[in-house]
Image: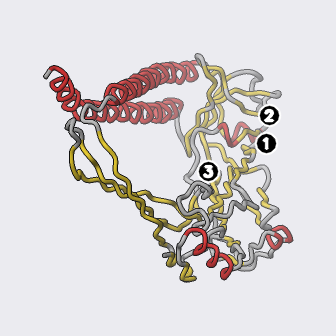
Amino acid sequence: MKVGNFGTGKTHRRVYVRSKERDGNFWCGVVLSVGVCIVTGLVVWSEYEARHSHKAIEELVRQIEYSGDEVALVKGDRLPEGKVVYLYDVHLQADAPVFDDDFGLRFDNAASVRRVTEYCQWVEVQHRSREKVGETAEGDDIMEEYVSYTYHLGWRSHRIPSLFFDSPVAYNNPQRDPSPSYEMTTRGTLAGGVVLEAADLSELPPSSLYRIPDDVVQTPTAYHNNFVTHDRSHFYSPYVESGVAAGVMSYLIDGIIDTGIRGDCGAGDIRVSFEVTPYPDTVSLIAKAEDGGTRLGRAPAGTTTLLLNAIGPASPSDIATLAAAKVENGRFWWLVGGVVSLLIWAIAMAWLKPFSASATHRKQA
């Protein structure tokens, strides 16, 4: 039965024989061991990358050949072409607003704007229960298994194909996507007209959810895609279907009764929000001067290229310390992943070993 955000599916029963010798244990061990080797290799690689990143940061600071501030830029000092420069506490803003023409929105002083599209979709959850109901003459277990399904409706970050659901008609997920997610970035302009790409900045303020103005005008594109309502955070496009026909097909094909009670959303509905990352008021940065000193880009350092910045006033050592802390944070989480993988491997191998031992004992007997 399907009610609101929840639904139940069919239950399947099967009886099978489970060999106590579990020949698959060897291959399970192989797969687990290969997985641990891969994770270990990734941890070693992260250590290698972290060491090189630290060296690159130190090399970038040593390459600084020009230091300036906002006063110097406003006065018209030209940045030396092809040199690594350090600028202290310089004002920064977007060189132009960002527009989303589909929804008629304008974003001022945005480093990046991410359109976030969410889809109301069913998720299928499988439930299994097993119990031993007897033994064969060889001593293997006779098992009885029940497999049932529940379905849960909600907003998802991606579309979920329902074709392979156990009840694909009753819990159909329409795959419409008229306004997919995407991200727009801008160029920033420093005092004095020096420009840089927002994507090159290593530090930006946190993004926030854009508040949709009450008087926003619906565009033809939004109307065509049925975005007919909105609140302060989302535009909504409901999916239109024949409820009676869908209910009849649900019962005839999948045997599921559709009560017609609507949940928080309907399968196929879409909502769109926007996450905005603003430019900070001022930045301190280390970068390479290009195009006659009118543009800043990433500078070669070690085996990579870098443009490092801090929000507000910061010395070169402060900027380097901030960048090194981000490298260490990434290294920490790689190490945590390695430790967790080893624990999972140890627990799994301990679980598999008793069955292998019992199988060996039976063969010797």
Precedes in sequence: disc 3 or disc 2:
3
What crowding class fits label 2: few (fewer than 14 Cα within 10 Å), some (14-19), or many (20 or more)?
A: some
Image location (x, y in percent) of residue 231: 64, 77
Q: How far apart are the two marked residues, 3 and 1, measured between alpha carbons?
A: 16 Å
Q: Which residue is mark 3?
A: 280
Q: Quadrant of residue 72?
A: top right
Check the image and report above or below for 163 versus 61: below
Instruction: Mark 3 vs mark 1: give the one in front.
Output: 3
Image location (x, y in percent) of residue 197: 72, 40
Residues 121 and 287: in front is: 121
- Amino acid type at image mark 3: Pro
What crowding class fits label 3: few (fewer than 14 Cα within 10 Å), some (14-19), or many (20 or more)?
A: some
Q: How far apart are the two marked residues, 3 and 2, measured between alpha carbons?
A: 20 Å
* On-image quarter of the C terminus: top left
Q: How many marks?
A: 3
Q: Are marks 3 and 1 in contact (CB under 8 Å)?
A: no
Dot 3 falls on a residue whose secondary structure is loop
Check the image and report above or below for 260 versus 296: below
Who's the residue at 54% across and 72% down the image? 255
- Amino acid type at image mark 2: Thr
Precedes in sequence: disc 1 or disc 2:
1
Image location (x, y in percent) of residue 55: 50, 19
Residue located farthest toward the left when viewing the structure as drawn: 365
Dot 2 falls on a residue whose secondary structure is loop
Image location (x, y in percent) of residue 204: 58, 46
Image disc number at residue 74: none
Image disc number at residue 294: 2
- Amino acid type at image mark 1: Gly
